[in-house]
Image: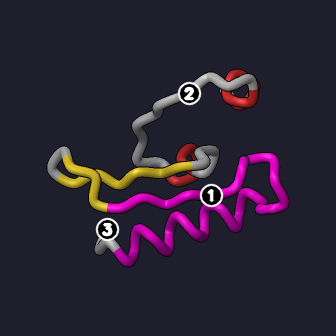
Amino acid sequence: MDELNSKGQTIIMVTHDIASAAHGNRILYLEDGRIISCLTLPCYNSDLDKKEREERLSLRLSTQRW
């Protein structure tokens, strides 16, 4: 999926798994079918390592009371 995305293909993935979500550049948080928050991260192959991406996602989830 990373290769497709790097070629300009938009990918939409629905998951509850933080490790999988960490691959995304834009993470939308939904509640009752509505977008309640959005987290934008640099491209996956940037200097931001996987652990830091997952930590940012976890922090955002905790602020959303999840």
Residue depicted at x 71% and y 63%: 51
Quadrant of image for the N terminus: top right
Q: Is residue 44 left or right of residue 31?
A: right
At label 3, the amino acid type is Trp
Judge by depth and name the residue closer to the eye, 20 or 8: 8
Q: CA distance from mark 2 to mark 1?
A: 15 Å
- The percent coordinates of residue 56 (x first, y second) are 58, 69
Mark with earlier residue (2, 1) = 2
Residue behind mark 3? 66
Q: Element under label 2?
A: loop
Q: Which residue is mark 2?
A: 10
Image position, residue 19 (x, y; %) = 59, 50
Query: What element does badge 1 sit on?
Result: loop
For the residues labelled 3 and 1, say whether their Cβ atoms are less than 8 Å apart.
no
Q: Alpha-carbon distance for marks 3 and 1?
A: 20 Å
Does the magenta segment cover residue 60? yes
Q: Are marks 2 and 3 in contact (CB under 8 Å)?
A: no
| Closer-to-camera residue (30/54) | 30
| In-image side of 51 versus 28 (left or right) | right
Residue density around tag 2, few if under 14, some if 14–19, many if 20 or more, within 10 Å: few
**For residue 38, which quarter of the picture?**
bottom left
The image shows residue 24 at horizontal and vertical percentages of 59, 45
> Was residue 43 drawn as part of the magenta stretch in this picture?
yes
- Numbered disc 3: secondary structure: loop
Q: Which residues are magenta?
A: 37-63
Mark 1 = which residue?
41
